C-alpha cells in the first residue's frame, strides 16, 4: 500500500466515512486493529464528549478566581463537586 492510500485510509477511519482505497482483507491484523481504534476515537460521540470535558476543565480553571470572590460562585462550585 502506498503512503497516500494509507493516509487516505487513516483519515477515512478517523472521520468514520468508510471510504476505502484498498481491500481491507489485504491488511494484516495489526493494521485492521489500528483502523478500528481510529474509528473508535474518531466517533462523533467520543469526540463530542472529549471536547465537552476539556472545555469544562478549562472554563473552571479560567473562572476559578471569580468563584473564590463570590458567595454564589462558591455555592455553585460546591454543588458541582457534590454532583461529581
Image (cartoon, rainbow, N blue to C red):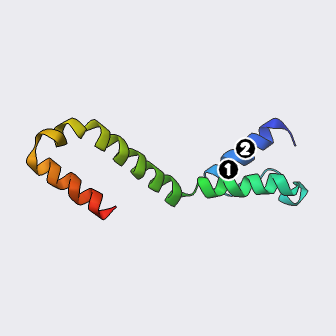
Q: Which residue position is annotated with label 1?
A: 12
- Classify the position of the N terminus by image quarter: top right
Work out how far the residue at label 2 is from the one at label 1, CA to CA, in angstroms: 6 Å
**Residue 9, horizontal then vertical, whole percent:** 74, 48
Q: Which residue position is annotated with label 2?
A: 8
- Mark 1 lies on a secondary structure that is helix
Q: Residue visible at 29% across and 44% down?
A: 60
Residue 61's image quarter?
top left
Q: Is residue 44 left or right of residue 56?
A: right
**Residue 37, horizontal then vertical, whole percent:** 69, 55
Q: Residue visible at 15% across and 54% down?
A: 75
- Mark 2 lies on a secondary structure that is helix
Q: Are marks 2 and 1 in contact (CB under 8 Å)?
A: yes
Choose between 68 and 11: the one closer to the eye: 68
Q: Residue furthest bottom?
A: 83
Crowd rating for badge 2 (residues with CA inside 10 Å; few <14, some 14–19, many 20+)? some
Residue 23 visible within the image: no
Amino acid at each position: 500500500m502506498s503512503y497516500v492510500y494509507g493516509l487516505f485510509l487513516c483519515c477515512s477511519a478517523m472521520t468514520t466515512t468508510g471510504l476505502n482505497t484498498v481491500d481491507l482483507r489485504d491488511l494484516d491484523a495489526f493494521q485492521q486493529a489500528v483502523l478500528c481504534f481510529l474509528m473508535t476515537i474518531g466517533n462523533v460521540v467520543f469526540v463530542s464528549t472529549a471536547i465537552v470535558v476539556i472545555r469544562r476543565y478549562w472554563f473552571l480553571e479560567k473562572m476559578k478566581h471569580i468563584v473564590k470572590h463570590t458567595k454564589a460562585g462558591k455555592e455553585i462550585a460546591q454543588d458541582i463537586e457534590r454532583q461529581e
